[in-house]
Image (cartoon, coloured by chain):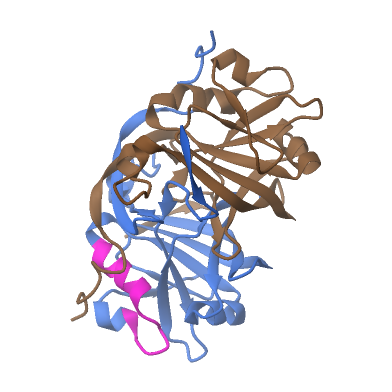
Chain colours: A brown, B blue
Amino acid sequence: MKKSLGAKTLLYPTPVLVVGTYDAAGKPNVMTASWGGICCSQPPCVAVSLRKATYTYHNLCRRKAFTLSIPSEPFIRQADYFGLTTGRETDKFASTGLTPVRSELVDAPYVKEFPVVIECRLFRQFELGLHTQFVGEVLDVKAEDDVLNTSGMVDILKLKPLVFTPDTQAYYGIGGLAGQAFSIGEGVTH
Amino acid sequence: MKKSLGAKTLLYPTPVLVVGTYDAAGKPNVMTASWGGICCSQPPCVAVSLRKATYTYHNLCRRKAFTLSIPSEPFIRQADYFGLTTGRETDKFASTGLTPVRSELVDAPYVKEFPVVIECRLFRQFELGLHTQFVGEVLDVKAEDDVLNTSGMVDILKLKPLVFTPDTQAYYGIGGLAGQAFSIGEGVTH
């Protein structure tokens, strides 16, 4: 029997994405966001939703570019910190000791120490309500060698990305391989 | 050292969402999608992107409503099957033995056996390219009692949702608790 939980933003899993932008003065900034995901295959696009109250919102509107850096489990504290503080008052790179890298493709920085980064130019911007959705066209994805499998594809068990749970507000890791997509479902019919 | 993987739709984790709609004749249909996520807190909204080639795309345009049912690990084969076949030719509920439930809030069915369901009315629709992004306003989230913790919140370790990996095209489970959000990052600065 299902129980009603109300009109809430609950969805599982949600990602932990660190959005990189430059401010008006050229200071690199990062913030953590979980309202986002892939939204188009061609052109390849990802979406991330931000409140106008964030520093990143204004940076992104001005620069028309952003990166998504995906923190691995060992960087959980830094990723959480990036969501606790505002770049208006803090240089989050300086205060954590992480390294901003200027993208060669878009006008935005990414986090050197995080194993996967996605470089985006702003493609569309939609006002939805409290959040504005920014759709970025992916110009490149870069990954550390040590998170790739022998075929050169990202191995999520090496990447160890974080999962965010909206209601309990916690981070989880990734579990084991459950099955191959577009394959394990064959023959399930009766 | 980071290696360029090209302009690809890679993001971790991505969810496994089963989109429920009715067709013109009232037949309930489901398809699996991983291009989606939460996109606004107020109004509470989720986004899912679909290709025009899908049966669900046309159902959703007509009915202006959809549900997202979140399969748990034990339903991995059915969830995969829902992405392997088209509702044009198949009654996917009949062929898997799963049960369609008519939402009392929106003109769409959900999967009774899946532990969490999200009922949405179509709020916005954006043409991005190969995919159209459908933004649904969440009218209710319903969950089985046995996936809730003692505070009535969804426990992701009880829910056991699937994670999809875009490049290796596989499903993974959820790992252990890694830390509490808006808390574990305090004091990380040096």
Left or right: A137, with B2 as reference point: right
Residue A160 seen in the figure: no
Q: Quadrant of residue B90?
A: bottom left
Q: Residue at x 53, y 37 (%)?
A: A69
Residue farthest along the top direction in this orientation: B190
Left or right: B164, with A50 as reference point: left
Q: Position of residue B25 (x, y in %)?
A: 48, 92
Q: Quadrant of residue B27?
A: bottom left
Q: Which residues are magenta?
A: B75-92
Q: Residue at x 31, y 74 (%)?
A: B99
The total number of labels drawn is: 0
Task: Tell me which secondary structure the magenta stretch mostly adopts.
Answer: helix
Left or right: A110, with B113 as reference point: right
Asked if residue B85 is among those painted magenta in the image, a careful observer would answer: yes
Q: Position of residue B64 (x, y in %)?
A: 61, 75
Which of the two residues, B84 or B140, is positioned nearer the viewer here?
B84
Q: Residue at x 35, y 29 (%)?
A: B178
Residue B74 seen in the figure: yes
Q: Residue at x 50, y 14 (%)?
A: B188
Q: Quadrant of residue B94?
A: bottom left
Asked if residue B70 is among those painted magenta in the image, a careful observer would answer: no
Q: Position of residue B28 (x, y in %)?
A: 42, 81
Q: Position of residue B164 (x, y in %)?
A: 37, 55
- Rendered view: A51 above or below B47: above
- Rendered view: A58 above or below A7: above
